[in-house]
Image (cartoon, helix red, strand yellow):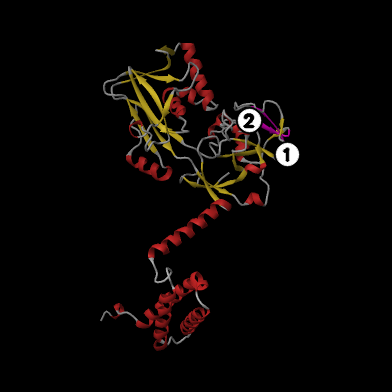
Amino acid sequence: MFSFFKKDPLRELREQSRAVLHHARRVWSYRRDLWSEAERTRFGEERAAVEVLAKEKEFPAEEMQPALERLEATLRELGGSVYPNRMIPEWVELIVVAAIVAGGIRAFFLQPFKIPTNSMYPTYHGMTAEVYPIDGAGPGFGKIVWGKITQWAKRIEVRAPQDAAGEVWIPLSAVDGPVQAVGLDGGVFGTGLLAGPNDVYLLQVGAASIPVAVPKDFDFITVLLKTYFPEQAKLPMGTVERWRKVLETARNRGDIVARDGHHFLRTRHNVGAGGRLVHFSILTGDMVFVDRMSYNFVRPKLGDPFVFATKNIPGLNDSRGNPQDLYYIKRLAGLPGDTLQVRSPVLYRNGVPIAGKPAFEKNNQRRLDLNYMGYFPSAGGSLYAQPLREARTIPEAHYYALGDNSGNSFDSRGWGFVPEREVIGRGFFILYPFTSRWGLAE
């Protein structure tokens, strides 16, 4: 009864022989150069004896047992730090080998790349916001959990203090400036310890200033537009232009007020004590696999979403001439020798509307229903800027990079051409989040 629980001595001996031979191969690889010729000969003969017996069809247990004992005794004598087996060195070796393999794959084949901003929106998403009405119920528990799983959503709800009520005001950095950022997250007790990569903005209710902390590079102005200025939020233009429309309207209405040396923008929205000021979820940026191999054999193609290093692009140096050592992903919109020009919303390549990729065609058609706002000729910039108000020819060994979100992209229009030698690879697969965009990238 219950004979299936009994151990099979012959099977155990087979498994033992495989294990001992495995260790023998490791010891031979790591230690043989330290042995004398006689020790190498003895080890080889004992190892070969076990290998021959292990290959026999009729497993000779009576011969295998003493052969294993002889080989194992020699392993203990000559194995040094390799045998007897030590778990920690074995795991360390495994981890090191795995790290080397992963590093090789990342350096030469596939590299994950996190999309930081929305310059390629809606093809690729950086951090985006799902904004909820401040007088509504907001998402339920199920939606919050599902958003966390599929998009790593982080919900932010900011309320007025219980002792403050009245109109919401937005502090400005200047009379014509954006919403005021008061600095980075200061960490524990302002020491910088465990500081998060956050920007902190202020909203004003009565005499109370209420901070709103969001990740660096997050587009907080879009949250303010959708919360307090919904009409301007719908305009077919970039975020900066929409905000300028808000400020222009506010100036005409006298809604920008100076107090104590600072400027404040009226929202004409009142909240009660403890009322919501903003309510939104931050959705994570896309995680994209970058193919680092293909461009070693073929040249980048028009329309490729290509990744490049910024360190040797002069227009991306800071005010002191220090280069940004970053990686950007943009759409390759012009090859060496091409002539580009924008007559909004259309991008012309060599005198005809650019084609070949859905993002080109949707922007040329200004597909507002799909969040393609069309092309704009300028993105600001410095003396290295290459705006497209007039036709511009791309020099040899350089490329022209544009964001699909032309109204909100700092690209070759603002800092110039991309040197061919700085190109890293092609974005080809959206790994995360698990949305309809998951899969091969456009």
Q: Residue 139 is drawn in which quadrant?
A: top left
- Mark 2 Cα-neighbour bin, 10 Å: few <14, some 14–19, many ≥20: many
Point 42% across, 84% down: residue: 67
Point 35% across, 31% down: residue: 190
Query: 290 above or below 76?
Result: above
**What's the amino acid at mark 2?**
Arg
Say whether residue 121 is left or right of residue 76.
Answer: right
Q: Residue 270 is drawn in which quadrant?
A: top left
The picture places residue 159, in percent across and down from the top left corner, at: 32, 27
The span shown in magenta is: 336-350
The picture places residue 431, in percent across and down from the top left corner, at: 49, 48
Q: Residue 396 carries which label?
A: 1
**What's the amino acid at mark 1?**
Glu
The answer to whether one can see residue 110 in this image is yes
Say whether residue 118 is left or right of residue 301.
Answer: left
Residue identifier under label 2:
413
The picture places residue 123, in percent across and down from the top left corner, at: 55, 39
User: 114 and 61: which one is in front?
Assistant: 61
Total labels: the figure holds 2
- Where disc 1 sits, the SS reads loop
Say whether residue 35 is left or right of residue 206.
Answer: right
- Mark 1 Cα-neighbour bin, 10 Å: few <14, some 14–19, many ≥20: few
